[in-house]
Image (cartoon, grey):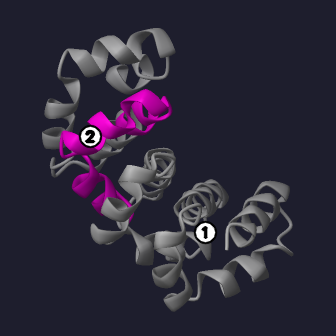
């Protein structure tokens, strides 16, 4: 938890990335302990909040275990993975890699709130909205009925989800 907490502070993020922390975190993500995985996912999600590190996070190989976190049995791992992927998807160069890594189905599942966690749902809708910002992704998103899902979420009780769903549809 200490590394994830330190990664919340903007002034620590550059030092952490430049020191090669991502290289180690991608291996920590492979731990058999869900608690350890959760904190590694949270650390990467926190580091990914700063756009300038989004390319480095993907280049270091942290994306595959982050995508795996979307399907973790732990809803907090799922939440932090969706947050991190949503942040990584702000970088247009990462979006195809995210889709090719297989994140779409898990993001759609979380966007439907299949794990019961509202925050996971918010982050998944945020991630899908970012991915929809690029026309090159539209065919895949349409094929997986993302527009229909977002249209249904425009009536959601949560204003953040309603807004993100509206922005997602506006990207098409």
Q: Nearer the viewer, residue 122 or 137?
A: 137
Q: Nearer the viewer, residue 94 or 83?
A: 94
Where residue 128 sits: x, y (%)? Answer: 56, 65
Is residue 13 located in the magenta-colored stretch of the structure? no
Quadrant where the image shows the N terminus: top left
The quadrant where residue 23 appears: top left
Determine which of the numbered discs, if any, sits on residue 116 in the image.
1
> Distance of mark 1 from mark 2, alpha carbons?
22 Å
Crowding around mark 2 (Cα neighbors within 10 Å: few <14, some 14 to 19, many 20+) is some
Circle 1: element type: loop
Is residue 49 located in the magenta-colored stretch of the structure? yes
Which residue is depicted at the point 46% across and 71% down? 136
Where residue 27 sits: x, y (%)? Answer: 13, 41
Q: Nearer the viewer, residue 30 or 85?
A: 85
Horizontal placement of 95 versus 65: left or right? right
Where residue 144 sits: x, y (%)? Answer: 50, 87
Q: What residue is pinned by disc 2?
A: 36
Q: Nearer the viewer, residue 56 or 36?
A: 56
Horizontal placement of 1 versus 148: left or right? left
Q: Main secondary structure of the magenta part?
A: helix
Which stretch did the figure color magenta? Answer: 44-70
Where residue 45 sits: x, y (%)? Answer: 43, 39
Which residue is depicted at the point 46% across and 82% down? 140
Circle 2: element type: helix
Residue 115 visible (yes or no): no
Horizontal placement of 33 versus 163: left or right? left
The quadrant where residue 127 appears: bottom right
Q: How many marks?
A: 2
């Amino acid at each position: 938890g200490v590394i994830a907490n330190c990664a919340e502070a903007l002034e620590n993020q550059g030092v952490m990335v430049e020191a090669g922390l991502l290289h180690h975190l991608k291996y920590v993500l492979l731990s058999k302990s869900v608690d350890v995985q959760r904190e590694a996912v949270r650390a990467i999600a926190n580091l990914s909040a700063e756009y300038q590190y989004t390319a480095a996070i993907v280049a270091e190989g942290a994306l595959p275990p982050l995508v795996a976190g979307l399907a973790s049995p732990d809803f907090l791992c799922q939440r932090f993975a969706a947050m991190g992927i949503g942040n990584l998807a702000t970088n247009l160069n990462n979006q195809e890699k995210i889709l090719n890594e297989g994140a779409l189905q898990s993001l759609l599942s979380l966007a439907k709130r299949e794990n019961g966690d509202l925050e996971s749902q918010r982050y998944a809708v945020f991630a899908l909205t970012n991915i929809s910002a690029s026309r090159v992704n539209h065919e895949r998103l349409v094929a997986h009925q993302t527009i229909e899902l977002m249209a249904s979420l425009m009536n959601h009780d949560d204003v953040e989800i309603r807004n993100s769903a509206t922005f997602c549809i506006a990207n098409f």
